[in-house]
Image (tube, helix red, strand yellow):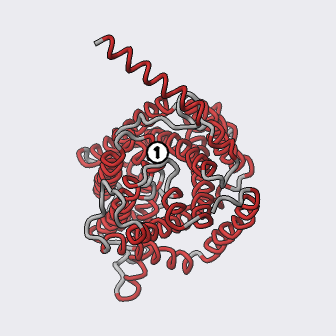
Amino acid sequence: MSEQGNRSDREQGAIAVEAKRTGRLLSVLGVAFGLAVLVGNTIGMGILRTPGEIAAHLPSAAAFLLVWVAGAVYALLGALCVSELGAMRPRSGGLYTFVHHALGGYPGFVSGWTDWIATCGSAAAVAMVIAEYLGPLVPSLAGWQTTVAAALLVAFTLLHWRGVRMGDLAQQVTSLLKGIALVALALVALVVSAPEVADAPVAAAAPTLPAGMALAAAVVLSLQSAIYTYDGWTGPVYFGEEVRDPGRNLPRAMIGGVLIVLAIYLLLNAAFLRVVPIEQMAGDPFVAATAATRLFGPVGDSVLRVLMILSLVASLSALLMMASRVPYALSRDRLFPQILQRVNSGGTPVPALLAGSLLALAFIASNTFDTVVSLLAFFFVANYVLTFTSLFVLRIREPDAPRPFRVPLYPLVPGLALLGSLAFLAAAIYSDTKNSLLAIALVAASWPVYWLLRRQRPDRR
């Protein structure tokens, strides 16, 4: 038994040495990490704020809950498609790896470019929100939000620098704490009787469910909010080659993670409806705060702040890990500087991790990350369009390639996912033209960068 243990230690040591010498990542992650990174990356501030927006569009409890189910269906369709691609081509780097393989250099570069910017912008935004919520809990930190946010980013960067096993542990612990905290809040809201709240004077008629085209528009706007709140389900494929038995474990993590998120979202929204009736929820910018205040009285604000911090710490950890894998993959394909593919003995692509952290710190220091946050949904869904298209291309071009997992009901499932993504982009361009045009401009800005890089390496497509 000890011989086997010694041999295992020697093998792991050899893998670590090889990783440091050749820039290889370590295949040490399991399904638990995949579930943790999906839950950690997906469940954030959105579920605590978005219910009021959806209730304003659809002031009906049944329609309200159906929108959350529909958002999960879209995420599940996407997860099924990406599971096939991830099992077929398990490479770390997120959706970029599939797009580059199927559609070529520039579409792949656009996918990686926008994904990296959006992921680093998300990390910056999350760090700032954590800092803002810490202020009232720790008065000595009030007024130092930028410094606290930067310190949080640096702290998690140093943690992940140590290696992927430390990142695995941190992600599982923080995501577990997040899940426990959110479920506990929901159970309290469902079990404990909230104190009676005096009815506000009736200044206007209660909101009613629209009809006809107005109802269709309300459904579209509600779905936009819900889909954004589910965004993050791609998390496990950023670590494709680091997951043991990816043909089996990636689909399990993707599909299981989406179902876990759906269960938590439905439980929370059912709890919110019990404490804050739909007509009072409509337009409330922070339904969770209203619910916490009614449940816990004066300490409700503190309870919610602790809950937010627990929730967002897991998101920050996941985002920094994911952000490091995108430039690593781009560098490996000679689309980013070669130094970014270096990996330390712990399996962390340190230069890529530092590059992502520096970009996030730049967003924090310049206060421009608010603009980036407004572009996130457009960037992410545009990447989904490229990814679902890649699935069709690879089914045609490589019909006999090994596929440990295949999308059920092909081509219906990826077709619905692709049509849903295109409809989302069309609605975004119509409803938020300014930011949509800015997103398109950022995509256009990637062309000269790509051209310069390809000029230096004409041997690559």
How many discs mark residues in the rendered view? 1
For the residue marked with disc 1, what is the amino acid? Phe
Q: In which quarter of the image is the N terminus?
A: top left
Q: Residue at x 34, y 86 (%)?
A: 211
Q: Residue at x 39, y 88 (%)?
A: 213
Outermost residue, bottom side? 212
Q: Is residue 197 left or right of residue 239?
A: left
Relative side of 246 to 141, left or right: left
Q: Is residue 195 visible?
A: no
Residue 76 in sight here? yes
Please state the horizontal and vertical placement of residue 73, each as a whole percent of the image. Answer: 32, 65
Please, what secondary structure does the residue beneath circle 1 have?
loop
| Picture coordinates of residue 437, whole percent (x, y) | 65, 74
Circle 1 residues within 10 Å: few <14, some 14–19, many ≥20: many
Side (left or right) of 235 relative to 269 = right
Please name the residue that numbered disc 1 is placed on. Answer: 239
Q: Position of residue 176 (x, y in %)?
A: 37, 37
Q: Name the residue nearer the viewer: 190 or 422.
A: 422
Query: Observer-nearest residue: 243 or 179?
Result: 243
Q: Residue lying farthest top?
A: 2
Compared with 24, 221 (above or below) is below
Q: Looking at the picture, how far across and down is residue 168, in whole percent? A: 44, 34
Q: Residue furthest left?
A: 191
Vertical side of 318 occupied by 269: above or below: below
Picture quadrant of residue 178: top left
Q: Residue visible at 49% across and 44% down? A: 315
Residue at 60 percent of width and 41 percent of height: 131
In terms of depth relative to the viewer, which is nearer, 208 or 78? 78
* Quadrant in which the C terminus is drawn: bottom right
